[in-house]
Image (cartoon, rainbow, N blue to C red):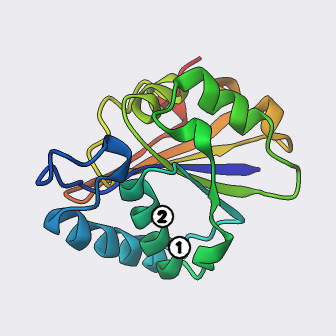
Amino acid sequence: MKTLFLMRHAKSSWDDTALPDQDRPLNKRGERDAPRMGERLAKRHIKADLILSSPARRALMTAKVIAKSIDYKPKRIVVEAQLYPGAVDDLLKLIHSLGKKQDRVMIVGHNPALMELAHRFSNEITRMPTCAVAEFTFATKSWSLVDNSSLATVALEAPKKSKKFSWSNRLE
């Protein structure tokens, strides 16, 4: 089994319009939501063998908060340039290239790519608000075989609500 967590970064600040997009930090809501989401994931005993983050400041800030919450050393976060701004096909190539040793991988990045990939895996996911985490479990031993045909379970955690989808609701 392989478990993939797609996490959209927490809410970012637009206060300093002179900042390049990649340098925007979290705003107050993002600084509040990221630790709360981390606590929720920790209560569910979520663990990651690998956390990949976009190099954008807001994504990396989110990844570090989540990492601490789930007992993953923030210095082990791998910053992956192709996650900013991200394209759905690039995300899928990245996932398919993951090594066999990692069974649980978290990717912290941006919409629309995360939303498009989540929807590609499960048509039940139609929205990914900031700080949301889509969790996919695949019945496969290899990341190269991860697609909607190997999907076993789907869940979505968002700051305001969570939803678990049944296996029968997956795309065929």
Residue ID at (24%, 54%): 12
**Residue 21: x %, y % from top left:** 31, 42
Q: Mark 2: which secondary structure?
A: helix
Which residue lies under the disc numbered 1?
Answer: 67
Of the pair 151 and 96, the residue shown nearer to us: 96
Q: Is residue 27 above or below residue 137?
A: below
Q: Is residue 129 left or right of residue 136?
A: left
Pick out the residue farthest to the front. Answer: 18
Q: Nearer the viewer, residue 61 or 99?
A: 61
**Number of numbered discs visible in the structure rendering:** 2
Residue 34, compared with residue 69, is above or below; it is above
Quadrant including the C terminus: top right
Residue drawn at x 18%, y 62% as measured from the top left:
27
From this view, report whether residue 129 is shown above or below residue 116.
below
Residue 116: name its quadrant. Answer: top left
Give the CA separation, mark 2 to mark 1.
6 Å
Q: Regarding mark 1 in the picture, which secondary structure is present there? A: helix
Q: Amino acid at mark 2?
A: Ala
Q: Quickly name the residue at label 2.
A: 63
Q: Residue 127 at what x, y percent from top left?
A: 29, 34
**Dot 2, how many residues are within 10 Å of its Cα: few (below 14), some (14-19), or many (20+)?**
many
Query: Is 29 left, or right, of 95 in this rendering?
Result: left
- Residue at 44% over, 26% down: 119
In this picture, residue 149 sits left or right of residue 36: right
Residue contact at pointers 2 and 1, CB within 8 angstroms: yes
Amino acid identity at mark 1: Ala
Tell me residue 112's x, y (percent): 37, 28
* Rendering quarter of residue 49: bottom right
